[in-house]
Structure formats: C-alpha cells, structure tokens
Amino acid sequence: MKIDIKKIIVLIILIIVLVGIYFLVSNLSNNKPNISAIKEYDIILYGPSEITLYKGEEYEEMGYYATLNHKEFVTGDVIVTNNIDINKEGSYIVTYKIGNALKFRNIKVIENPNNNINDIKLELIGNEVVEISLNDSYTDSGCLAYDKNNNDISNRIVVDNQVNTSVADTYYVIYTIVENNKEKSIRRTVIVHEKEETINDLNLSVSYDTSYTNKDIEVNITASGKDFSYIKVPNGNQIAVSKTTYTIKENGNYYFYVYDNNGNYKVKNINVTNIDKSPPIAYCDAKRSSDKTEITVTASDNLGISNYLYYTNTSKITSNFSSFTIPEHLDIVKVGVLDKAGNVSDITCNVKSSNIEMHFIAGISDDDAILIRTDDKVIMIDGGQYGAKDKIVSYLKDLGITKIDVMIGSHVHWNHVQAQAAILDSFQVGELYYSVDIMNCVSKKQCVSRDVLYIKDKIKEKGITPKIIGIKDYLEIGDMKLYFIGPTRGIFTTYENANSLVFILEFGRRKFMFTGDTPSEYMDVTKFTNYANSFPISLDIDVLKWPHHGYENLSDAFFKATTPEYAIIPNCCWCSSKYPSSTNKNLMKKYNTKYYQVCDSKNIVLLSDGNNIEIRTNQKAKDYKR
C-alpha cells in the first residue's frame, strides 16, 4: 500500500494545532479572575449633598453608610475629612472615602442676613475695674459672647490688651466681635498705680454733672494741703495749681492724684457713665391704609429712649410711645427717635400698604361663599350648600387659610350655611354670627330642619356659641368696619331670604354692601338710610353684592342712593338668574355700574388698598396663597 506522505504531514500539523488550542484554553480558564474576590465599595450619604450654614452655626454630620459588594455594611471603615471653618465665609468639602469609593458633601458658610450686632451679648468674666500695684503681674479674666439664640460664640472675640504693669497708668482691655461688618465692644479698666501713702494733710475734691449728656463733661478738681505740689490728671499731665478742670470725652473710670513736695499722694476715682454721643439705633415699619398710617418703631440705646417724633404731612407730634397711629394717608413715613442724652436718629419707615382681598367662590349652583381677608384678619360670609363643601374647603386651603376670625351666615338657608359645617371641621373659627338663633330657629319657626342640616350638629361638636347680630350692630375686625343696616322686615319667619343680613363693610375709603338673599321689597332705601345715618355712614357704596343670586329687581331709588361702581352676582349658569333682567341691566347702564357674574367669571377676586379697586375673573386660589 502506498503511503501518502503529504497527508500524514498535514494530519500531524492539525493534531499539533488542536493540542495547542486545548492547552491555551485550559490556561485561560485557570487564570480567569475570581469575581467573588473583587471588593466593590459604595457610600450612601444621608441628607443633601449641598448644605448652607450661617457663619458661627455648628456643622452637624447628617450621616452616611457604606457597603461592600452591595451586601456587607462596612460603615466604620469610612474615612471622613472635614476642613470646615464655621467662623469664616467660604466653600468647603467634606469627603468620605473607603476603598475605591469616594463621595463629597459641599458646605457653604455665609453671613446670616438676619443677624444683628445688637442681638449679640458680651459679658466680662470678673470685675469691670481691676486695680493692681506697679510691677505686679496681670492675668486677664476674659470675656464671653452669646448670640440671640444664646449660643456661645466667645471664640469669635478679638482681644486688645495693652496693659503695661511697669508704668503706672489707666489701661483698657477691649473685647470686640464683628457681625455683618459691624462691631460691638466691651472693655475692662485696669489701673496700675503706686502704693498710696496716707498723708492726712492732702485733700482732693472731684465733682461733675451726672445728668445724661451728648457733650464732653467738665470735671472740677480742687486740691489742698500744707505741702501741696501738683495735681495729676488722667492723661498724665501735672498741674501745679490747686484748682483746675479736666475734660472727659467718653465714659469710663478716671483717676486723679494730688501730690505733695515729698512725693506722697492721694487718689480719687470717678466712674463716668452718663455720656452718650451715639444716636439710638432704630428702624420702623408702617402699615398704611387710605385714611390712616399705623407706625411701629423698634429702637435701642445705651442710656434709653426719651421720646419719639412723628411727622405728619403738616406737623410734628411728640410721643412717649413706640407705636402711633396718624389719621392720614402717608406715602412716606418719617420718625425722629431721641435718647436721654439728646441724640436724635431720623429714620424713614418701611411702608406696607394695607390691602383687602374678596374671593367670590364658585360653588355648584346658587351658592354664596365669600372669603374676605386683610393682612391680619379673615372673614367668611356664608359657605354654600353641603354639596359644594369640597370645592369651598379646597379653595380655602389653596389660599393658605388656617384660621377664620369671623364667620357670618347672611341668613339660615340651606344653600348658604350647610357647607359651613365642613368649614368648621377644616379650619379654626373664632366667632359665629347669624341674624337668628341658629340652634333654635326650627322650633321658633324661623327656618326649617333642612336649613340647619349638618351645621347645627357641627356647631355643637365644636363647642362654639353663635351670636345673633342685626340692625344697628357694628363690628370692627382689624382694618375692616362692618355696619349692619338690615334685615329691615323685623319679623323672622321661615321665609328665610327676608331674614338676610344687610351690612356695609368699610375698608379705607371704600365701601362694600353685602345683601344675602334679601327680597326686593325689603331692600328699603328709607330704612337703610335711617339705620346708616345712626352710625353715621352714607349709602354711597363702591361695590354691591347683588341680592338673591341676581333674581331680585332693584329699584331706581336704591341705585340713586348707592351708585355702586361694581356689582357682583354669585349665580349659576343653568338657573333663571344667569343674566340680569333688562330692568337691572338698564339701571346699571344708567348709573355706570359694571357687573360680574360667578356664572361667567367663575372665581372672582376683588383687590383693594382702600383706595383703588381691581376685579379679576377666572382666578385660581393657589395664585393667592400666603
């Protein structure tokens, strides 16, 4: 048999290649890394990765933890590096490191804009005046500093100590702290003197006027003695006359010496505290309405405040009180603050205009729900039917309402007061007012049981005692004055609408009339005028809340007496009162009254500063949240 050499050689080469591949794969397999032996660390930080601190505020570590291979906790092995200097503005980094894991927390230290140098308290440790003999050693006792939250910030004190015990003199150790580029200091007086010899023949008299002053003080010095030589005054000068004066420019301890010809002396010390050349530190706020300006002054002074000068448009009024009301509308408010030494700080107040908001809230049908608030007071008029409670409560919460000072039910009718139950349940309510006794109006036949459904039980649950209010009654709620001139019928029955309260709310120069559901026949101009004049106010109003959701036709006599610039109608789009009648339209056209309907405009918001009036439609409560 013939052997094919070429084929044998090819076969041998193929076998060698295959064996090589086998050993190569085996070797790679043996050298494959052990996944379980790799250490993979991770660091998780608690809290934000960026923190801002006010200067002097301690940094508190918010925490962290570390894991190994996402399973084992190894927090204790994390190295934390913190180079924060809380007394110096700047940006700092806290680093967290373990293995190959590294995390950072960025810290920014800034000045606290709310910190006031006057809020810092400095206290000497030890005596305010220290006397030591010449060449004795002196060790200062130090000083403490606290911020307005009583935190110890003594480490921020800078000490200026120039005491030289080898030279007899008066020295001051001054302790200073800086806040927002302003300084506050306190000092200790250190007297270094020679040992006093008792010489009966020497006498020294020192006197000065101790009343408060913002001028230098003249000290009268008289010395006597058989061997009198000279008087030594605090600046070191020697005066060889027995009677002289010395000028003191600032408070402090001062030492005067009288010497005889033999070098013996006597010393007198005075502690001057009645000089104040710095005006008071003062600022003020003013709340302005159209007819008055309320001013509140905050002031401080070393010697105390003497009085305040309030400037009106035409005069200057002196008062001992830091709060004052000027019966004028002031665009710029100026006050002079005087201290007991006669220094004056003339300041201009931060003026805040007092404003009123009226929210006519869209319910689900013919509902009245009106929220009124100023800078510090809240009134709720009605609230709608129970089915509207969620919309009403949600709207009030979106406004940021938490407390209602006064809630008024214009009349005890289901579509006006039922939802007040949910308002009582959701907010703190101060006073409740109705035209009838809501707790007993069913038995007195002044309402029906449906009217007090929900609300009566909720009033009992909350333990509130409702009050009855009516004609010739008056409420003052913050800057708002409420004058009640209706109901005019006088007899209360289950014709609930006729029991409606009518009142004029006065804010600044503007007046707003609220009418509930008063029927046309009881919108009695003659009676309204008589009741209004008893306060006295006029019926000339700026805004009318139209009675009974627009159902009522008002008279020409009423419009002539009231001449409202605006009318607002809480109504529904599918009710017969969707649009005013032609009679009412003609009246409003005649008297130039512009009207708004909740039906068309949804939530209506009226804004006024007591002078100007702005009405906005289709509003969202969240846009007015406080």
Image (cartoon, helix red, strand yellow):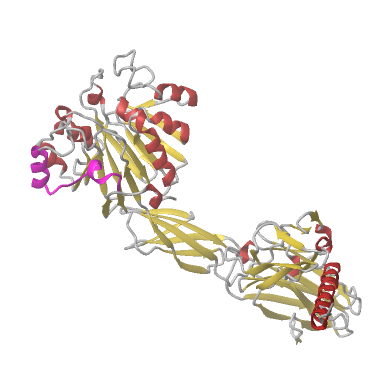
Does the stretch in magenta take in 460?
no
Residue 254 appears in view: no
Left or right of 619? Residue 55 is: right
Q: Is residue 395 above or below residue 615?
A: above
Residue displayed at 25% across by 38% down: 570
Left or right of 78? Residue 352 is: left
Does the stretch in magenta take in 597?
yes
Seen from the viewer's position, the closer of residues 507 and 187 is 507
Seen from the viewer's position, the closer of residues 594 and 472 is 594
Rendering coords of residue 194 (x, y %): 88, 78
Residue displayed at 78% across by 82% down: 232
Quarter of the image where the N terminus is located: bottom right
- Residue 493 is drawn in which quadrant? top left
Seen from the viewer's position, the closer of residues 321 and 447 is 447
Residue displayed at 40% across by 60% down: 351
Q: Can you name the residue that lies furthest to the top here?
A: 443
Left or right of 37? Residue 516 is: left
Seen from the viewer's position, the closer of residues 413 and 430 is 413
Rendering coords of residue 553 (x, y %): 13, 34
Rendering coords of residue 45 (x, y %): 70, 59
Rendering coords of residue 360 (x, y %): 30, 42
Q: What is the span of residues highlighted in magenta in the rendered image?
A: 582-605
Residue displayed at 37% across by 39% down: 379
- Residue 552 is drawn in which quadrant? top left
Q: Is residue 1 above or below residue 551?
A: below
Left or right of 8? Residue 623 is: left
